[in-house]
Image (cartoon, rainbow, N blue to C red):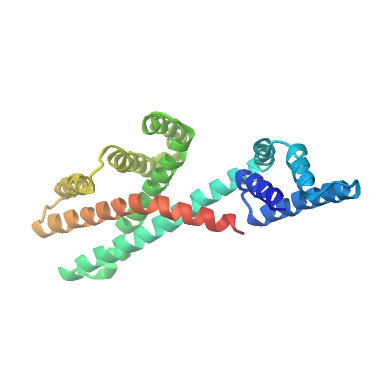
Amino acid sequence: MYAAEELIDKIVNSSQIPSGKRRQEVQRELRSHIEDFMLAAREAGRDDDEIERLVLANFGDPEQIARGFAWVYRHERKMLRIFVFVLSTVVLASSLSATILAMQAGVAFGVGIPILNVLASRHTVIEALDILSSVAVYMAFTSLERLFDRQRFQKATCLLALILTPWCAAAGVHRAFLIFGFVNGVFFRAIQVFITRRMARIGIVVACFGLAGFVSAQLRSPVLHYAVAINCASWLVMGAGYELVTDLAARVEAALFNGLQRI
């Protein structure tokens, strides 16, 4: 019966069950329950039109049933969200690290610096950790903002600061990565939320990361002109990569979530 199938689809589609296999099991159980009800109604002499009305009248409120399933599977849904967050962070951070290192290696090769000096340096490890923490903070921002209806960015910033504070206290010498990731994540999320024009966002990133590269080069001794140029170029490459992540993050997360839901 079309109405009964429509009712089942409405319940399952609104149930927020995170697993495709479990949704199919629920569909089969609901369909079996309705078929048993219809069989009993036919044996009692009811016609098809009357049976359809009885199904819709006696089955219950579909929204309430869907909320019941959502409550039952709430823990699985949370675990899926956490898994997608971790997987999205790893995918984006790994891709960004590989891209940035490849571009920096190209710059180094262009000025005659051995590529191994770039890839096998302590700076590379620090840079990879900075990227990982920045991407993780940005992804956490987008997740925490879903908890709020108004002033999402401000509230997510405060909540994330509260979450990271004890981590920073326990991280010791490694707290610098968390602090850098938090500042970087706040920066990129802020310009994405409050700056609507893409070219304006790119201009802000170029100005800020170019300045950061120049300042960090000046702190080194001796200060060499080519080193300043390379450092600025390196920071600009990082800024471009982070800007790209802000564009891809939601798509990657949605693709992974939808893909895992089908399993």
Residue 74 visible in the displayed image: yes
Taking 86 as reference, is 30 left or right?
right
Camera-side residue: 4 or 240? 4
The image shows residue 145, relative to residue 47, as above or below, that is above
Q: Residue at x 50, y 54 (%)?
A: 87
Residue 172: x percent and y percent? 42, 39
Residue 37's x, y, as percent? 83, 46
Q: Which residue: 25% across, 63% down?
A: 104
Furthest toward the left, the residue is 225
The residue at 66%/43% (across/down) is 73
* Whether residue 97 is situated above or below residue 135 in the rendered picture: below
Asked whether, in this view, residue 158 is left or right of residue 260, the answer is left
Q: Position of residue 203 (x, y in %)?
A: 18, 47
The image shows residue 78 at horizontal and vertical percentages of 59, 43
Q: Is residue 12 above or below residue 194?
A: below
Report how many numbered discs are placed on residues in the image: 0
Q: Camera-side residue: 78 or 98? A: 78
Lateral position of residue 103 relative to residue 142, left or right = left
For the C terminus, give its image quadrant.
bottom right
Q: Is residue 166 left or right of residue 79?
A: left
**Residue 112 seen from this side:** no
Identify which residue, 124 or 237, lies in the foreground: 237
